[in-house]
């Protein structure tokens, strides 16, 4: 009886090892980074006050979120001078590439803007825009496609520049 118990225990241990090891070996690759959004590339009608972003890659899915605050310097965007708009971004894609520690991804980003109108009321505006984002161990660059003739509406380049504050691969 004791011999049968040892044999059954050995069989259970063997089966557990065979099933558990392959499951744990299939752990998906994870890339995580976060940082700041510090400025626009070439914009004269507003400036970035502060902002942050984060990105996570798990398996073949990339999730990106960001939030930043923008100070309006001119009424050209139909906002009072001195008012602050708040932007949030959400983006999920499987179209990304990691080369060493540099992550590049592109696609259609969902933008939500809490906009201060000329009469100082707040409105929520949403749109999608095509972007390419490049993250290095030190820098963040969001390249937004220009809208209309020249570099974007109002002749400005709305690309965003920032820093990477943490990176884990």
Image (spheres, helix red, strand yellow):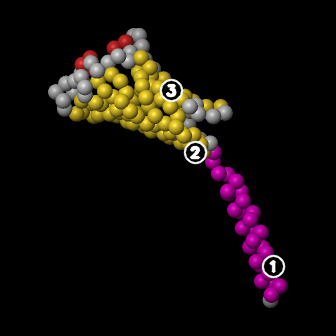
Q: CA distance from mark 2 to mark 1?
A: 41 Å
* Residue at horizontal 75 percent and vertical 71 percent from the top: 13
Give the number of the disc on residue 7.
1
Q: Nearer the viewer, residue 78 or 74?
A: 74
Q: Quadrant of the C terminus?
A: top right
Highlighted range, magenta: 2-29
How many numbered badges does the structure rendering display?
Answer: 3
* Residue at horizontal 24 percent and vertical 22 percent from the top: 81
Q: Can the viewer see residue 107?
A: no
* Residue at horizontal 45 percent and vertical 25 percent from the top: 160
**Closer to viewer: mark 2 or mark 1:** 2
Does residue 29 sit above or below 153 in this rendering? below
According to the picture, the residue beneath numbered tag 2 turns out to be 58
The quarter of the displayed image where residue 62 is located: top right
Q: Secondary structure at mark 2?
A: strand
Spot occupied by residue 166 in the image (x, y as percentages of width and height): 54, 40
Q: Secondary structure at mark 3?
A: strand
Q: Residues within 10 Å of mark 2 (few under 14, many from 20)?
A: few
Spot occupied by residue 136 in the image (x, y as percentages of width and height): 58, 31
According to the picture, the residue beneath numbered tag 3 turns out to be 141
Q: Nearer the viewer, residue 164 or 7?
A: 164
Tell me which label, 2 or 3, sits earlier in the chain. Answer: 2
Q: Can the viewer see residue 138?
A: yes
Is residue 97 highlighted in magenta?
no
Q: Residues within 10 Å of mark 3 (few under 14, many from 20)?
A: many
- Asked whether, in this view, residue 141 is left or right of residue 43, the answer is right
Q: Residue furthest bottom?
A: 1
- Asked whether, in this view, residue 45 is left or right of residue 42, the answer is left
Dominant secondary structure (helix, strand or loop) of the stretch shown in magenta: helix
């Amino acid at each position: 009886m004791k011999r049968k118990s040892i044999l059954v225990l050995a069989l259970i241990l063997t089966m557990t090892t065979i099933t558990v090891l392959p499951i744990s070996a299939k752990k998906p690759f994870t890339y995580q980074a976060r940082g700041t959004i510090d400025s626009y590339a070439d914009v004269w009608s507003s400036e970035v006050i502060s902002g942050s972003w984060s990105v996570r890659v798990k398996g073949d899915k990339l999730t990106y979120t960001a939030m930043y605050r923008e100070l309006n310097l001119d009424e050209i965007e139909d906002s009072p001078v001195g008012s602050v708009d708040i932007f949030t971004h959400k983006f999920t894609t499987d179209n990304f590439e990691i080369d060493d520690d540099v992550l590049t991804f592109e696609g259609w980003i969902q933008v939500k803007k809490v906009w201060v109108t000329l009469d100082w009321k707040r409105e929520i505006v949403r749109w999608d825009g095509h972007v390419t984002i490049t993250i290095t161990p030190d820098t963040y660059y969001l390249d937004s496609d220009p809208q209309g003739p020249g570099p974007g509406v109002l002749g400005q380049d709305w690309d965003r520049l920032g820093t990477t504050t943490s990176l884990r691969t």
